[in-house]
Image (cartoon, coloured by chain):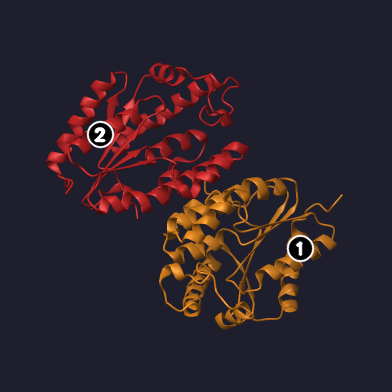
Chain colours: A red, B orange
Amino acid sequence: MNVLQTSHQYPGLLIVVEGIDGSGKSTQLQLLKTWLQQHEYDVFFTEWNSSSLVKKTTKIGKKKKLLTPTTFSLIHATDFADRLEQAIIPPLKAGMIVLADRYVFTAFSRDVVRGVHRDWIRNLYSYAVRPDLAFYFRPSLQTALDRILVGRANLKYYEAGMDLGLSHDPLESFRIFQERIMREYDAQVAEWGLEVIDSNQSIEEMQAQVRERVYKFLEERPVPKRQ
Amino acid sequence: MNVLQTSHQYPGLLIVVEGIDGSGKSTQLQLLKTWLQQHEYDVFFTEWNSSSLVKKTTKIGKKKKLLTPTTFSLIHATDFADRLEQAIIPPLKAGMIVLADRYVFTAFSRDVVRGVHRDWIRNLYSYAVRPDLAFYFRPSLQTALDRILVGRANLKYYEAGMDLGLSHDPLESFRIFQERIMREYDAQVAEWGLEVIDSNQSIEEMQAQVRERVYKFLEERPVPKRQ
């Protein structure tokens, strides 16, 4: 049952990026995508919380501030289950490279900080496909804050973790919230073999490391190129 | 973490009814509700899959026949989590008698038949409040079929378990599906101490047994009456 514990057997490749907001992970994944496409790979991109099936629910829930940690967690799990079966496994079966902006490790960090149990949430996602490569972009907290707050007047309610009652000041709440999430991510490096990328570096430096790692992986486990 | 294993500490009372379609459970619960209200109890009624938060999602998913066993299960779990925290625990805290038409045992039966793992689904609902009384209405399969099919032209796709590919004939599919669900329910009698009510009896006979059991329970563990 615990699929997440073993490697998948599909011909494709699953690469995921993780990290707190402002870690640069999305930019890095987009750059990786372009690079892979230039090298004639068939690439499929998917991101956290984007399933059409649950988008509306999340929106309503967030708007009404109705979400408790458990419902919040379950809505994301439903979104993930839907995407896994509709959008991740089919391209993997077809031999494509699937790039996922956030994966189960986001839930293992964020939902735990929100208050759900570590074992419960791991069981919840136990049917997920184990990624072939999982990059964890790790900035210093200050670097992340600087990146996020540039040209931004307001932090959103859930983004700042305001539902946790950490602080009445959104900025302070956000700082505490992100720091806790980072701690949960850090603990998962050993647990899941996440590849840590120091995100205090420049975009170019990070991308060079990512490409090198992916290149090495593709040499060992080649994936079909575009026909 | 496994709240479902231990009794709750709220002043209220949680009574749930379970059973396959056509077992008569909803009718029995409505009759019990009326009876309790006549005896001056504050009663709160809630039913499976009725949370406003996820109603729309379920509807879309069912319409598009997009639901895999896991997403189907997670949508129901989200609905349940939402109702538990918004509609079940608050009245229990307020000392009311909460009547639930279907509870976690529905998921433990139906979702397992649809293909999710027994342990996974139990973990998923492990945070639920353990009911004080859980009635399991058990008809013979033929009794249930007769009750359901009276004056009904069509069985709905998911209701008949057509997504499981059991049979091309909706009626035959429904029969196999309900029989399997019944087997899962039966196995839970010992697991959770469900109170079995023989649903081949008349409405009056069943109701008499239900009232007797509830009456006895209320003698042992009184609940405040309406002020």
Coordinates of residue A40 in the picture (x, y in percent): 18, 41
Q: Secondary structure at mark 1?
A: helix
Q: Residue at x 57, y 28 (%)?
A: A162
Q: Residue at x 42, y 77 (%)?
A: B167
Q: Amino acid at mark 2?
A: Thr
Q: Residue at x 54, y 70 (%)?
A: B156
Q: Does residue B9 show up?
A: no
Q: Secondary structure at mark 2?
A: helix
Pointer 1 indicates a residue of which chain? B
- In the drawing, what numbered circle is on residue B33? 1
Q: Residue at x 56, y 22 (%)?
A: A170
Coordinates of residue A36 in the picture (x, y in percent): 21, 37
Coordinates of residue B29 in the picture (x, y in percent): 71, 66
Quick check: B171 above or below A64?
A: below
Q: Mark 2 against mark 1, which lies toward the viewer? A: 2
| Depth order, front residue of A124/A152 | A152
Q: Does residue A92 show up?
A: yes
| Depth order, front residue of A9/B188 | A9
| In-image side of A58 versus B217 (left or right) | left
Q: Would you name the residue on which mark 2 appears?
A: A34
Image quadrant where residue B20 sits: bottom right
| In-image side of B172 versus B220 (left or right) | left
| In-image side of A54 versus A65 (left or right) | left
- Gap in angstroms between the C-alphas marked 2 and 1: 62 Å
Q: Amino acid at mark 1?
A: Lys
Pointer 2 indicates a residue of which chain? A
